[in-house]
Amino acid sequence: MAIYNPKSLKAEEFINHDEILETLQYAEANKHNVELIDALLEKARPKKTETGCVCSGLTHREASVLLACDIPEKVEKIYEIAEEIKLAFYGNRIVIFAPLYLSNYCVNGCVYCPYHLKNKTIPRKKLTPEEVKAEVIALQDMGHKRLAIEAGEDPVNNPIEYILECIKTIYSIHHKNGAIRRVNVNIAATTVENYRKLKEAGIGTYILFQETYHKENYLALHPTGPKHDYDYHTEAMDRAMEGGIDDVGLGVLFGLDRYKYEFAGLMMHAEHLEAVHGVGPHTISVPRVKRADDINPDDFGNSIDDETFAKITACIRLAVPYTGIIISTRESEEVRSKLLRLGVSQVSGASRTSVGGYTQEERPHDTEQFDVSDQRTLDEVVRWLMDNGHIPSFCTACYREGRTGDRFMSLCKTGQILNCCHPNALMTLSEYLEDYASPETKERGYEVIAEELNRIPKEKVRQIAEQNIDWIRGSDRRDFRF
């Protein structure tokens, strides 16, 4: 029998089934233990120090207790502290990105994804270099600077060489004032050698969703194809980090299995990365199963309501305070609004989840991986964020300045966000306003920038940011960064 060991490199030891079951039993037994819950809330709350702000976070077992707690006033306290942590470490910035689907060819049999091999109704498509270029120009014309590329697992149609060539093409395209400055990659688990190639290609974050940490159900949900190998898939982040990739992104697909089990597994995976590599996940995504071609979410029987979804997000923020939390256009404007307050720091905008979707005037549905709930334009999303007290950020400076992995976490933990990421967000917002925004959004945006410049603590940083924004407004000079 496998023994729980967060420092192990074996999947069944750092994501240990018996440990999760014991954790869930402990959480259920203590979900009304007010003394313990209050102690955990106090532990999670950010504390100010001379050098910034610190947060101890919570273990998977401690966070599971808070997730199980159903005392209304304690749940509200969880939400309150989640917002405190978000503001302490990320401020009111919200990073914006878009997914770019390169290919829906796939050899796996995943029963929750319309790209599965046996689906004969979905048209199969793979972007050519010229089509990649056209998609990127369409995304640049919206104002995007950061992409997450997606592709099915198919060694013939989507080999690593194809992915690398696409990345090279994406980075090479400079249209008008547009440029994609960061390419994150969400592709299947691969080898250390291939992760080194992705690192050399200049990727940002490597993202891989676990889908479910329950091994028995994982095998049933992935009946055929290379993704059927639970251990190889679950150990992928260790290989990615061995290959030199500093920033990795975790996530489960909520709705496939019981959410409390998945939450505990997700937190254990974050603890494992911290224990072995000295740095936890750069991001955690919180997708839910959505309807798609030949996929019905009700078939899985583990769907979660919006309130539970909000609570999961808030508990992630308390447990792993320095990690970015991502919510996609799978979710509605209403759901996204609530989760932004509870710890989300990145959102997608104007997403199309079909291969070649950005160059088409009407949103195509025939090759979508999932239904998009939030179908607003990027301009509408930007204005919505500002109207709700957030700063839309197109910043990619940390990645290009080498502030990744533990170096980014150090910046975050010492409270330097307001002197670095905050002015970078304002400068990239100014770029968006000048090059892509509607008149209404542009007017609102400069009101926000004027207000937010005053929040930069260091006078010299504020003066430089103001000067750079003046240059952006008065010329074609772009890409200033701290």
Image (tube, grey):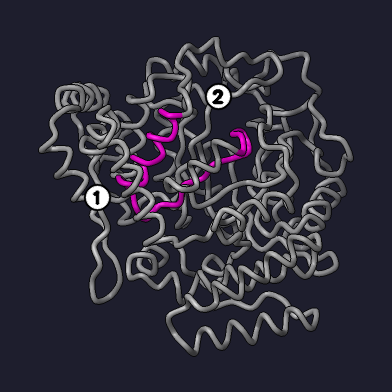
Which residue is painted at 36% across and 46% down in the image? 317
Q: Quadrant of the C terminus?
A: bottom right
- Residue nearest the viewer, comparing 266 with 1: 266
Which residue is painted at 73% across and 79% down in the image? 472
Residue 385 x %, y %: 61, 53
Q: Mark 2 points at which residue?
A: 289
Q: Which of marks 2 and 1 precedes in the sequence? A: 1
Residue 458 x %, y %: 44, 84
Question: Residue 369 vs residue 416: left or right?
Answer: right
> Is 313 inside the magenta-drawn segment?
yes
Q: What residue type is labelled 2?
A: Val
Residue 209 visible in rendering = yes
Which residue is painted at 14% across and 34% down in the image? 34
- Residue nearest the viewer, comparing 271 with 476: 476
Label 2 packing within 10 angstroms: few (<14), some (14-19), many (20+): many
Q: Which amino acid does label 1 sit on?
A: Ala
Q: Which numbered dot is residue 44?
A: 1
Give the image quarter of residue 351. top right
